[in-house]
Image (tube, helix red, strand yellow):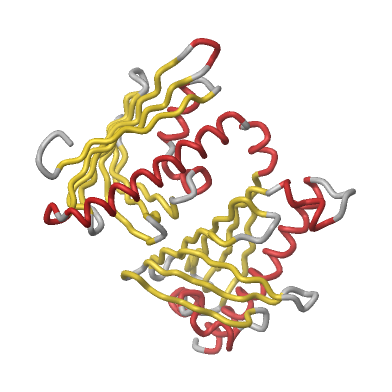
Amino acid sequence: MSESGRREVEHEIVVSAPAETLYRLIAEAEAWPQVFPPTILVDHLERGEHTERIRIWATAKGEPKNWTSRRELDPAGLRITFRQESSAHPVASMGGTWIFEPLPAGRTRVRLLHDYRAAGDDPKHLAWIDEAVDRNSRSELDSLKEIAENAATTAELTFSFTDTVHVAGSAKDVFDFINEAQFWSERLPHVATVRLTEESPGLQTLEMDTRARDGSTHTTKSYRVTFSPQRIAYKQVTLPALMKVHTGVWTFTEDDAGVSASSQHTVVLNTANIARVLGPDAGVAEAREYVRTALSTNSRATLEHAKAYAEKNR
């Protein structure tokens, strides 16, 4: 700790990938939900050639938080500095630097530096931040290493798709149906039970038990970020066996004829469970089709019920 109340820490990892590749993964912050387990969503507020402001929603010690940061991007120097403009309690201030140091044989040392203070310089708050920074930094560096060293495999296992319905109603009514997930067990036949909490305005935790076509149920947990009445973004953190990552966004776009309501999914498959779930002869293609069908079936059912709700309220 360099001065009273101010902590400075550093984490590092060596990755068998070029520094430029690793720099790009950190520079492209909007993809972080697929890269970093703690990250729920990143939105750009301002974007210049080498300076940007981003808003980040992420978990810290399992608690969803959000804050705004300014970043300075230095592709020539292979470093990215960040400073939070608005921090989430119990953080009073936080900043740091990503540094990418080329090593022989195409490897890179990635260094992640943080400096921070706790609200009121409270030792208990500082201890909480210490643990959260350490946990998230290790998780992020490990994930960065895994993705960079297995880029081709990760690309093969990643896919996105979108389902869309047209609604003769208002975007607000469709948004309300998706936003008010606490009523889904009454409104959606494939949802058995729901637990929805809103830690702060627009930041939700959604847990639900969903019925499959064979009658079985499975429990999922997601963090959701809502932007009324245009979109709801989410990241699923309790995942079925065939998915390693699942993020998505509901969007509601009005036109002269009504609303285009869409559900977009991005998935990274978990190959370790394919044989157990689908049998020894199944591969990536079969797992992709199975997951897409399951997600699309539920999404389209939800969109059709949202359509009926909005058109009834027209």
As rendered, which of 288 and 97 lies closer to the eye? 97
As rendered, which of 188 and 79 lies closer to the eye? 79
Q: Is residue 170 visible?
A: yes
Residue at coordinates 44% horizontally, 51% vertically from top-left? 38
Q: Is residue 210 left or right of residue 55?
A: right
Residue at coordinates 32% horizontally, 46% vertically from top-left? 54
Residue at coordinates 57% horizontally, 75% vertically from top-left? 208
As rendered, which of 103 and 251 lies closer to the eye? 103
Q: Where does residue 125 sit, x and y in percent of width and height?
A: 22, 56
Q: Residue furthest right?
A: 281
With respect to residue 190, does 141 lie above or below?
above
With respect to residue 156, does 183 lie above or below?
below
With respect to residue 78, does 171 lie above or below?
below
Q: Is residue 196 left or right of residue 274?
A: left
Q: Where does residue 114 sit, x and y in percent of width and height?
A: 27, 37
Q: Is residue 12 left or right of residue 84?
A: right
Q: Is residue 49 visible?
A: no
Q: Where does residue 250 sit, x and y in percent of width and height?
A: 52, 64
Q: Is residue 256 left or right of residue 305?
A: left
* Placement of the N terminus among the 4 image quadrants: top left
Task: Name which quarter of the figure residue 16 lies in.
Answer: top right
Residue at coordinates 49% horizontally, 49% vertically from top-left? 37
